Amino acid sequence: MSAGTEQSSGGAAIEDGTEPTVGRRAFITGTVAAATAAGATAAGGTAAAQGEAYQGWFDDVDNYEGTVDYRGEDEVTVAVGAGDAGVLFDPPAILVDPGTTVVWEWTGVGGTHNVVHEPGEEGEAAFESDMYESEGETFEFTFDVEEGIFPYFCSPHRAVGMKGAVAVGNVDDELIEPSGGGSGGDGGGGQPLTTVDRILAGSGLLIGVALILAVVRPDTLNPDRD
Ligand SMILES: [Cu+2]
């Protein structure tokens, strides 16, 4: 697996420290290198997981994190023109039951969009919408198949990653719970902080700073200790 090759760079940094003054500097360098290697390994693992179900289709899609599981619903809505620039589908990857109708609804952001099935080498597109720009326009398609994955894209914005996929039946991917319709999801989030909250938050920050200072202070790494 690739994890092994990622980690080797950390070891090399320590082995290079052949001078007599190795002590503290080598230790710190080694720690930083190990942390970096761990981060690189984690990122690599995520990328590998994404490729399997959709064969790389989502590699350049900014808002893809997994497949939102809408099984049990007769009708599912996907936004056309999401994200800051309005050039994303949201959610980009969904899982539905056979016979479910997917409704793409235009947000009015990002210019003109369409929804076009990418059939790969197997043949004709199963669905292709007209071009729309205005908020509230819709296009729908009912997936009357037992199983399958239907990648699709927006023609004007395919090159910037405006791509999605509908999986029917099941999919080999990380499944995400639907967020619940977008209204009132996180109730208390907008309330202002009380004074007590601020003091608690402030002291937490101070403790964090104190811990960092304690770690960095030279006498905590005293080479004469033994
Ligand atoms: Cu578009």
Image (spheres, rainbow, N blue to C red):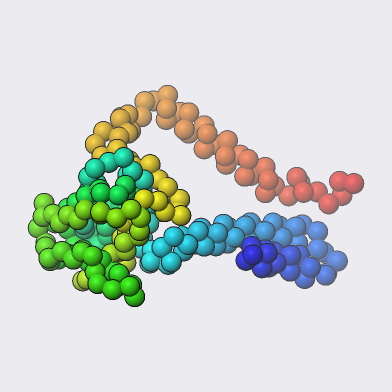
Could you say which is closer to the camera, residue 30 or residue 209? 30
Total tally of numbered discs in the picture: 0
Q: Is residue 100 left or right of residue 63?
A: left
Q: Locate residue 78, reporting x and y percent.
A: 24, 52
Q: Nearer the viewer, residue 35 or 87?
A: 87
List x then y, in percent, for residue 143.
Answer: 25, 54
Quick one: 71 or 15, which is closer to the camera?
71
Q: Where in the figure is residue 85, as x and y percent of width and height?
A: 24, 61
Task: Specify the quadrant of the image occupied by residue 159.
Answer: bottom left
Who is closer to the viewer here, 200 or 93?
93
Question: Most extreme residue toward the right, as rendered?
Answer: 226
Residue at the (82%, 64%) spot, across then down: 21
Residue at 57%, 41% (x, y): give it: 209
Q: Is residue 52 above or below residue 197?
A: below
The relative height of residue 75 versus residue 160 in the rendered view (above or below) is above
Residue 168 visible within the image? no
Residue 35 appears at what percent x and percent y? 63, 56
**Quarter of image, res 30:** bottom right
Q: Could one spot residue 109 in this view of the protein?
A: yes
Q: Is residue 203 left or right of residue 171?
A: right
Residue, x 77% and y 71% (percent of image)?
16
The outermost residue toward the bottom is 121
Quadrant location of the N terminus in the rendered image: bottom right
Left or right: 10, with 132 as reference point: right
Residue drawn at (11%, 62%) of the image: 133
